[in-house]
Structure formats: structure tokens, C-alpha cells
Image (cartoon, rainbow, N blue to C red):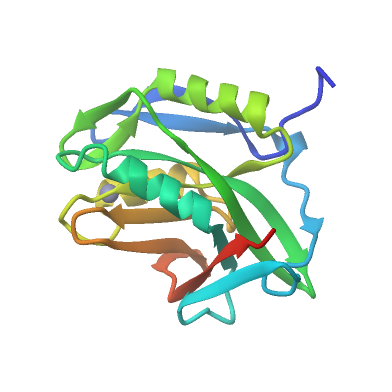
């Protein structure tokens, strides 16, 4: 199994300077051949043995998001580690299809260590990405990166110009999402693609597997 390809489109990330020159950003090189295999799988709300909770209004027309309670807890814990600066990381899971509808299931997250603090946005260093991909290779070979998250301590839920730059350039597949968490005001929100625009989603599902 040594040669097994990572099951996802994000294969490599390199450091680069972003256009504004404000700091290091990152570049994701998409490996054409490994473009996501979509699995046909029942979502947690159709499965037995899951406790599913609806947050807000689930949108009909765009991608449905499921996130495990464990992941929410994990991200909240990370977000509270330092509320004086922005922290971030990756959302890891699956892109699935059921009944003609695509959805993502966020199974876990990888906190990004070694981030740079540069003004209003979180930037991930080369070292961060190496660690993320090492973790993907070691622990999540059947999952893939389905988005990213970062914190806005006490300044609310939105995507800044820098955040939009990151999402448009490096998370430009229609199913890749952004999660913004404000650990001080205790708010959070998902953003995803709809008709080529990045919009805040009106709702999502969290779930817990009952053993
Ligand atoms: Zn931001």
C-alpha cells in the first residue's frame, strides 16, 4: 500500500508570496489524476445509529455539510488556545453522493501549527503544510481535505479580503468549504461555493454516532 495515492485533490502545497505582498500564503498544486472519487454513501441523517442536529436552515440547492460533534469540539478547543490571534487548520472528511445529492462529511480536523501571525489573516507556513500532509498520509489515507477553518477572535463571522483570496485560489473546487469560528462571541459559520460565488451557508448538520 506504499504507493497508494492520497484520495483527494490537494496533493502538494508550496510557499509563495501573495499578490499583496503582505505575507506568505500558500499554493496548492492539484494533481489532475487524483481528482476526487465521490463515494455513494447514505448521509448520517438517513442512517440508523446517528443523532443528527440541524443548525439553521439547510439549503436545498447547494452542497449539504455534515460535521461530527467530535470535530466541532476539537476545533473549539483549538480556537480557545489563543484568542489574541487567528488560528486555523484543515477540515478532513469525505465527499459523498446519495440520491443524486452531493454532500461533505467532516470527520475530523487538523490544527495548523507554525502559523504566522500577520495582521488580519492567518497564514500557514511551509512547515504547517508538511505536517498536514504527513498527518493525512499517516492517519487519514481514505479521507481528504474538504476545507479549512480559522478563527476571528471577537470580530465576527465573515470572510475578509485575504480569506477570500485564500479560498478562491486554493479551495476553488465547488465542494471545498471554509469555516470561521469566533471563540470569544461563540459564533461560527460555514462558507461554500454557489454558482461561482462564495456565500455563507444558511445551515448545516452536526451529528453524533450512537454506539
Ligand atoms: Zn479571516
Q: Please give left or right for residue 185 compared with residue 30 in the image.
A: left
Whether residue 187 appears in this view of the structure is: yes
Q: Position of residue 206 (x, y in %)?
A: 53, 65
Residue farthest toward the front in the current orientation of the protein: 211
- The answer to which quarter of the image holds residue 98 is bottom right
Name the one closer to the observer, 175 or 128.
128
Residue 150, percent from left and from top: 34, 46
Q: Position of residue 109 (x, y in %)?
A: 50, 42
Q: Residue at x 58, y 26 (%)?
A: 135
- Please give left or right for residue 161 compared with residue 170 in the image: left
Between 139 and 148, the one nearer to me in the picture = 139
Q: Is residue 40 left or right of residue 120?
A: right
Asked if residue 22 shows in the view, the reply is no
Residue at the spot 59% in from the left edge and 72% down from the top edge: 52
> Relative to 2, is 87 above or below?
below
Foreground of the two, 85 or 17: 85
- Total labels drawn: 0
Residue reaching furthest to the right: 1
In the displayed structure, 28 sits above or below 93; it is above
Q: Can you give x and y, in whole percent of width and height, for residue 208 in the image?
A: 59, 62
The correct choice, above or below, for 60 with respect to 186 in the image is below
Residue drawn 73% across and 59% down?
Answer: 96
Which image quarter holds the N terminus?
top right
| Residue at 52% from the left image edge and 50% from the top image edge | 172
- Which quadrant, please, contains the C terminus? bottom right
Amino acid at each position: 500500500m506504499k504507493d497508494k495515492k492520497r484520495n483527494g485533490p490537494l496533493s502538494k502545497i508550496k510557499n509563495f508570496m501573495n499578490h499583496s505582498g503582505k505575507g506568505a500564503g500558500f499554493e496548492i498544486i492539484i494533481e489532475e489524476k487524483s481528482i476526487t472519487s465521490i463515494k455513494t454513501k447514505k448521509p448520517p441523517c438517513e442512517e440508523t445509529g446517528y443523532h443528527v442536529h440541524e443548525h439553521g436552515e439547510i439549503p436545498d440547492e447547494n452542497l449539504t455539510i455534515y460535521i461530527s460533534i467530535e470535530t466541532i469540539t476539537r476545533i473549539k478547543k483549538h480556537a480557545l488556545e489563543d484568542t489574541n490571534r487567528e488560528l486555523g487548520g484543515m477540515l478532513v472528511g469525505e465527499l459523498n453522493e446519495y440520491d443524486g445529492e452531493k454532500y461533505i462529511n467532516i470527520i475530523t480536523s487538523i490544527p495548523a501549527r507554525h502559523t504566522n501571525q500577520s495582521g488580519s489573516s492567518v497564514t500557514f507556513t511551509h512547515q504547517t503544510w508538511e505536517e498536514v500532509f504527513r498527518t493525512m498520509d499517516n492517519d487519514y489515507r481514505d479521507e481528504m481535505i474538504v476545507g479549512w477553518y480559522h478563527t476571528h477572535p471577537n470580530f465576527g463571522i465573515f470572510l475578509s479580503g485575504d480569506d477570500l483570496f485564500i479560498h478562491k485560489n486554493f479551495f476553488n473546487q465547488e465542494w471545498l468549504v471554509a469555516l470561521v469560528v469566533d471563540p470569544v462571541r461563540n459564533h461560527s459559520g460555514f462558507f461554500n461555493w454557489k454558482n461561482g460565488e462564495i456565500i455563507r451557508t444558511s445551515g448545516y448538520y452536526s451529528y453524533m454516532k450512537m454506539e
